[in-house]
Image (spheres, helix red, strand yellow):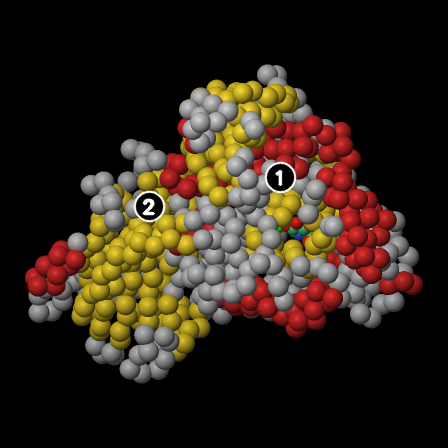
Amino acid sequence: MKKNVILSLMLAGAMHMAAVSITSPDGNLVLDVNVDAAGTPVYSLDYKGKPVVTESRLGIRADETAFTDGFRITGTDTLTVDRSWEPVWGEYSSVRDHFRELAVHLEAENPRRAMTLRFRLFDDGLGFRYELPVQNGPNYLTVKEELTEFNYPADHTLFCIPGDYDTDEYLWTETSFSGLPEAMKKYARHSEAQRVDGLTVQTPLLLKTADGVYINAHEAALAGYPAMLLDVDPQNFSMKSHLVPDRLGVAAYLQMPFNTPWRTLIVSDDARDILASQLVLNLNEPCAIENTSWIKPMKFVGVWWEMFTGNVKTWAYSDDPLAKPGVTDYSALAPNGRHPANTENVMRYIDFAADNGIDGVLVEGWNEGWEDWASYRKNRQFLFDKPYPDFDLPRLRDYAKEKGVKLIMHHETAANAADYELQLDRAFRFMKDNNYDAVKTGYVGAIIPRSEHHTSQWMVDHARHVIERAAEYEIMVDSHEAPRPTGLCRTYPNWLAQESARGGEFESMGGNPPSHTCILPFTRLKGGPMDYTPGLFETRMSYYGEGKDSQAGTTLARQLALYLTMPSPIQMACDLPENYLRFPDAFQFIKDVPVDWSDSRYLEAEPNRYITVARRDKHSDDWYVGAITDDNARTAEIDLGFLPRGGEYVATIYEDAPDAHWKDNPQAYRIRTVKVKPGDKLRQPLAPGGGAAIRIQKVK
Ligand code: NOJ
Ligand code: CA
């Protein structure tokens, strides 16, 4: 490979060098980099001899200067790296990081500019970033635009959600480049969020070519920079970077030297490889936390679903909308009597967790400020060290401790991120003083400062600030409505999970179609784990806020499979204790299923259709299998070739009953045990919208 580069260097002309190219370690991917006639850097990518990305331009435009043209290649460096690292938690106990790297150094005159493009080519895809060294001139940039293009050769299938500066809580669309204009019409503008009208989509998104090549496009290590959306040209099958701006239209304020996040393309002709890919994590920096012994994967229940289903219970203690946190004497307010974050109810959850080996109890609505929720679009504040009068924190703290259960704090900021930063140290100190070591954060509403969006540079910085401060206090974080993940959980493994997609809560708002969880692992999950909140056993409920019914898009057995197909080191058992007590044999699976794995094997996969995965518990020899389908019935073919030879095993299968259907018979399930051997092939029927969950143990 080196030879090719040297050859290209020797062939370089006087004005600018000829194309430089590298291949992936297995030779399947070929990357070419050059500058075009205008001196604009361009790249292209081939896979198994066919173009994935045709010639596409690169560049950054700022108020001060433009890194877009007039460049010549002044030198290149190549490097081959093959190493592995051990994540604190995850799908594998060891991750191989194997790539060829090409750094292309560029210079331009009048004015003088220098830039390096760094490419890493793995067997499963490409990552590249812009590196802006200290310049011979002003060293700050007011970035308006990044010109990164992804030109595709044909009218591929797209799996995407609409461009939005503030939310990713959408259902996915399966369309094509040419079908996108029509497909985007169905998305209504989210009430507070700033949707980008027109043909803009979010990453991670998935493309599929007519001959069966899958491409996941995203970014890695998003820090100090805004998130990237993609503007789509449906006629020319191309996409161009669209950075989320602040309300002045500025994407990023940078001080050089600066490296942008990596732009990533995971590529394979086997859909299972997209799910197995660790490329995004590999492009993130190693763990920045020296002692990680306090980071503990966990399962939890919570005072939470009560507020979604039934639409009677409230986060607020009182119905007085004039109550002001820190000003009002809450003990003088009339309680509304519909406030489940009360001492007695929380004790009930603690008992339930303790009885069932569940590690944690989340309590939402425990602190002052929720009365103002109705006006959350204006000024708003929560206090993170002021429990409501009916939430006896010292008593609950001691009770949880006695029962061996951890309380999980909730910080709903109502998107007042500025105020949260001011309270942060006090809030984290308060948590530690009261024996909490995990927090769920939330940013519902329009961001304060109002100049910002949920995924603009300022909020990306805010998220990292919170995670770094949390690490100092040894606090684990599960963030909702934060910038979508880009693998930073490798660097900060206390960032256990994020929501950053349409989660299980939408089952009470019309439902998530079964296909939804068949696409998320191909898209959203490539950035990191999701707090999807699986484990819904009562699938018919009152529609949140509307008094009519909502039918979840799932069978009960499928909810168990989600613990495998939506891997996360923090998993909720979202339903009410009383619903678990109605189905104790099925609940056994939630009690048993681990949240941390030493190995994972994707057995079957097709985006939006089905996923079958096997995982080995990190702390035992048990294997678990999860299989899900869309709203079509399906037979999963489970090849037990992953089981170590020489043993006999028993499989406990939690499956849809033969007449189960997500729509009209979701709670029909069966549990059976069968003896299995390595190499056996199980044919596992799945109902429409259904799934199966299997625990496999060695017979002693
Ligand atoms: C939205 C979050 O996604 C949900 O989990 C939470 O309960 C509410 N905000 C209230 O904070
Ligand atoms: Ca949410």
Q: Which residue is mark 1?
A: 534
Q: Residue at point 22% right, 72% down?
A: 107
Query: In terms of depth relative to the viewer, which is nearer, 282 or 510?
Result: 282
Q: Position of residue 596 (x, y in %)?
A: 54, 45
Q: Position of residue 628 (x, y in %)?
A: 52, 30
SS type, badge 2: loop
Q: Residue at point 60% right, 37% down?
A: 593
User: Mark 2: which amino acid?
Assistant: Asp
Q: Is mark 1 within 8 Å of ligand 1?
A: no
Question: What's the distance in space between the residues labelled 1 and 2, CA to CA?
Answer: 30 Å
Of the numbered discs in the image, which one, if any, rests on residue 124? 2
Query: In terms of depth relative to the viewer, which is nearer, 360 or 466?
Result: 360
Location of residue 38 by image quarter? bottom left
Residue 56 vs 533, above or below: the answer is: below
SS type, badge 1: loop
Give the number of marks: 2
Horizontal side of residue 178 vs 294, given as left or right: left
Residue extending farthest to the bottom is: 137
Query: In terms of depth relative to the viewer, which is nearer, 64 or 76?
Result: 76
Of the numbered discs in the image, which one, if any, rests on residue 257? none
Q: Position of residue 165 (x, y in %)?
A: 51, 57
